[in-house]
Image (spheres, rainbow, N blue to C red):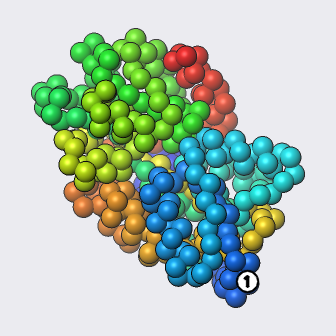
Amino acid sequence: MLALGRTLGVAVVIAAASAGVQAQEAVDVAKAKAEGKVIWYTSTPIEQGQKIADAFQKETGIKVEMFRSGGSSILRRFQQEMDAGRVAVDVLTHSEPAAANALGKKGLFLPFKPANFDKVPDAAKDPNGLFVGQRLNMMTHYLRSDKVAAADEPKTWDDLLDPKYKGKLVMTDPSFTSLQVSVVGTMAKTRGWPFYEKLRGSDVMIVQGNQQVSDMLKRGERLIAVGALDSYAADLKKEGHPIKTLYPSDGVFVIPSPTSVVKGSPNPNAAKLFAQFMIGDTAQKIFPADGGYSARIDIAAPQGSPDLKSLNIIAVDDDYVEREGARIKKQFNEIFQ
């Protein structure tokens, strides 16, 4: 069954991106090439981000200056620069839809509907073009199948609280990884903070980002990744590591990564061209090839991964996460400090 909700219930997997074709804006390619570069702040996994940057430069001749860090870190840097009155970036990509909504309301983004905007689900974009999903992120659990027997696999989120998993769990920090803000905020809202207090009692390890989660499992220092980005599990599988992705019966998270063109940016035409490239065929096919999900409804799920229609997707209340984001991070840090 599919859980219907605000963030990616119906829209990602059932509804078409929109009823009818939406107006798409032209980009002045000559002016973009004259600008010669685009500055991109992103939390896109480093290898995928570099592939996108390289492909864009090859196609257009425009250099991409990429600053890559965790989503929450990216957003802090961007907000600090904007508060100081300094617009230093052209395109912003992270994984916190609630933050994209909030920043859009402040007038920091340029409305822009590039080609293929109509192929992205409504729940993964702003109707006015203030942001559009770059990719969809499956947040679930994965484990070392050579060290956790099938009979001992957690079937639900609450199963993770079983004492038998003590010292075996690893999870990212929402203060660094913006994807985790939506996960933690939703779990705390629906299950209460005692869920995380009990996880703390199970000696769950907290690391900065999903790369560190992956490294912990690769080295066998931890055996189960909790609420982690599935594309990293796919990378481990490609490397030959014994990894199994779990799809809890009580749901997984599917969270879009918003991309926005920054208002008043140094290279406005190159910014638009790059944002358009990001949801074009070349860039969008990178994600399923690397084990992740494209933002577009016309591009198939990654090989070996389930179609989203087959999963129970946990709804995220973006308005709640936007309103309570700072408190969510603070409460989490108080529990796990």
- Please name the residue that numbered disc 1 is placed on: 34
Q: Note whether residue 58 is visible.
A: yes
- Nearer the observer, 10 or 106: 106
Q: Note whether residue 181 is visible.
A: no
Identify the element where label 1 is drawn: helix
Residue 48 image point, x, y percent: 45, 60
User: Which amino acid, mark 1?
Assistant: Ala
Residue at coordinates 15% horizontally, 34% vertically from top-left? 146
Residue 59 image point, x, y percent: 53, 82
Q: Is residue 279 above or below residue 230?
A: below
- Dot 1 crowding, Cα within 10 Å, few <14, some 14–19, many 20+: few
- Nearer the observer, 247 or 207: 207
The total number of labels drawn is 1
Residue at coordinates 81% horizontally, 50% vertically from top-left? 82
Residue at coordinates 56% horizontally, 43% vertically from top-left? 70
Residue lying furthest right:
85
Residue at coordinates 22% horizontally, 57% vertically from top-left? 304
Residue 281 image point, x, y percent: 44, 76
Residue 172 image point, x, y percent: 46, 33
- Tell me if 33 is positioned left or right of 218 in this view: right
Q: In which quarter of the image is the C terminus?
A: top right
Q: In which quarter of the image is residue 227?
A: top left
Q: Is residue 299 above or below residue 182?
A: below
Q: In which quarter of the image is residue 221?
A: top left
